[in-house]
Image (cartoon, rainbow, N blue to C red):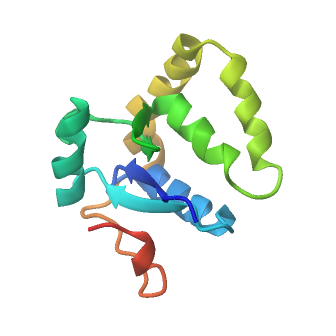
């Protein structure tokens, strides 16, 4: 089996946590691992990509040694899920600056629109192996 891709997400964001749970439910081939941007793993790995986890408001995808951000990360994740979700990958034809502009509007307002938690979401024991501490 190929190495699993790693999704870095905002662990206190309700939208982000719901998105992680959506990916888990539609990742039938077990292609993804998850870790919070606030965690030690993110603080260890992201500086290698000149990225500071403290200053991020985006999903990140580490896939085949390359780090993807914002809409590119989200669309690359969608491409690997089951059902009709991979059809969203067609939006990659839209120029990145337009896709990321829309993404940034959502990211900027995510706490206001969906709320935030006081601490990072803790996975159930059944899902624990999908997460990197």
Residue 68: x %, y % from top left:
45, 34
Residue 97: x %, y % from top left:
52, 12
The correct choice, above or below, for 106 with respect to 54 in the image is above
In the foreground, 108 or 81: 81
The correct choice, above or below, for 110 with respect to 2 in the image is above
The correct choice, above or below, for 103 with respect to 112 in the image is above
* Residue 94 falls left or right of residue 56: right
Tell me the quarter of the image containing the C terminus.
bottom left
In the foreground, 61 or 104: 61
Quadrant housing residue 30: bottom right
* Residue 68 falls left or right of residue 117: right
Q: Residue furthest right?
A: 84
Decide if residue 39 is in sight here.
no
Quadrant housing residue 98: top right
Residue 83: x %, y % from top left:
81, 56
Seen at 39% across and 30% down, the residue is 108
Tell me the quarter of the image containing the N terminus.
bottom right
Seen at 32% across and 60% down, the residue is 117
Q: Residue furthest bottom?
A: 125
Seen at 48% across and 86% down, the residue is 126
The correct choice, above or below, for 131 with respect to 15 in the image is below
Residue 86: x %, y % from top left:
75, 44
* Residue 39 falls left or right of residue 104: left
């Amino acid at each position: 089996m190929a190495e699993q891709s790693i999704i870095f997400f905002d662990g206190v964001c309700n939208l982000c946590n719901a998105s992680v749970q959506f990916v888990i439910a539609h990742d039938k081939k077990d292609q993804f691992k998850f870790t919070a941007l606030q965690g030690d793993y993110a603080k260890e790995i992201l500086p290698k990509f000149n990225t500071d986890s403290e200053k991020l408001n985006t999903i990140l995808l580490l896939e085949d040694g390359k780090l993807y951000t914002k809409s590119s990360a989200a669309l690359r994740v969608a491409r690997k899920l089951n059902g009709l979700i991979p059809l969203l990958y067609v939006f990659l034809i839209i120029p990145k600056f337009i896709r990321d502009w829309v993404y940034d509007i959502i990211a900027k307002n995510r706490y206001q629109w969906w709320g935030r938690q006081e601490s990072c979401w803790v996975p159930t024991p059944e899902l624990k192996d999908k997460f990197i501490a």
